[in-house]
Amino acid sequence: MLSIVKNNVSRIKKWVASSATVAAIALPLPAPAADLTVLTSGAYKQVVAAVAPQFEASTGNKIILQNDTAGGIAKRIEGGAAFDVAIMTPDLIAQLVARQKANAASVVNLARVGIGAMVLAGAPKPDISTVERFKQALLDARSVAYIDPAAGGSSGIYLAQLFRQWGIADEIERKAVKVQGGYVGEHLLNKEATLGFQQISEILAVKGVVLVGPLPAEIQNFTVYTAAIGAASKEPAAAQALLDLLASPETARVLQGKGMEAVKP
């Protein structure tokens, strides 16, 4: 009888050990945390930075945020820069897809933002309520700062075209402070210019300057920010999770506080 009991106990132990082994094999291992390289043009940087803590806390992944003008990002990628997510203008994203550097199925429109005028806090605000008054404010300003069109910034490219169309390009050129990238407002803080122009979200990001207002509706130019996952991304699932968050109603509320507005995905 004792031998029978011992044999049964032995069989039970083997069964328990075998079951535990099977269970251990069956249980999925947690996915390792991913580092996501996000290349974004200036105006959308503030949005990614705002949602990054929530994304990182909920997923365990880390965002490595790199910022440049839209044209600067395009040059980086063309030069071989690795990325998981790129956020640029729709035409540049389309070029990435055409060159098989971005996943076409992942492309999504995230936001749009208009151009605004700024002055130093405490300085008189020029009247830019109509096209004629806006033009006069440009001509009256001692110096005017905006993104250098040659740097690939969409606001600078548009303004340069507008100045040429109005026939005042030469006059503006003589007093222009052309910014290679970053915040134009910083050049007002350094007293390099008295009037500055950039996308509204980038104006609001600089303490010490104030938004005079958006360009008049007749000449306003909106930049749409579109995102895509890199074709060579090693973390496409994590990258898609980030795009889902950026396109969510929750992030739409963040956009409002940054001077931007959501667009349909």
Image (spheres, grey):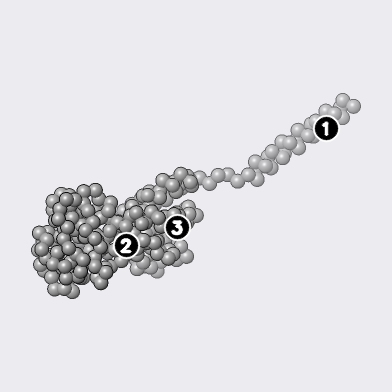
Indicate the position of residue 136 as horizontal and vertical percent values: 13, 67
Is there any visible trace of residue 265 in the rendered image? yes
* Number of other residues with Cα within 10 Å of mark 3, as a class: few under 14, some 14 to 19, many 20 or more: few
Sequence-wise, the earlier of marks 3 and 1 is: 1
Please rate how many residues cluster around mark 1, counting C-alpha atoms within 10 Å: few if below 14, some from 14 to 19, many from 20.
few
What number is the disc on residue 8? 1
Q: What element carries label 3?
A: helix
- Label 1: which secondary element: helix
Q: Mark 2 points at which residue?
A: 113
Residue at 33% x, 55% y: name it: 258
In the picture, the quarter occupied by the N terminus is: top right
- Choose the circle earlier in sequence order: 2 or 1: 1
Residue 131 position within the rendered picture, expressed as x and y whole percent measured from the top left: 19, 70
Q: Nearer the viewer, residue 160 or 125?
A: 125
Q: Distance between the residues labelled 3 and 1?
A: 61 Å
Asked whether 1 or 113 is in front, the reply is: 113
Identified at 18% across, 55% down, the residue is 119
**Horizontal arrangement in the rendering, residue 23 relative to residue 75 (left or right):** right
Q: Earlier in the sequence, mark 3 or mark 2?
A: 2
Q: In this view, does 264 lie to the left or right of 214?
A: right
Most extreme residue toward the top is: 2
Name the quadrant containing residue 196.
bottom left
Work out whether residue 100 can be spotted: no
Q: Distance between the residues labelled 2 and 1?
A: 75 Å
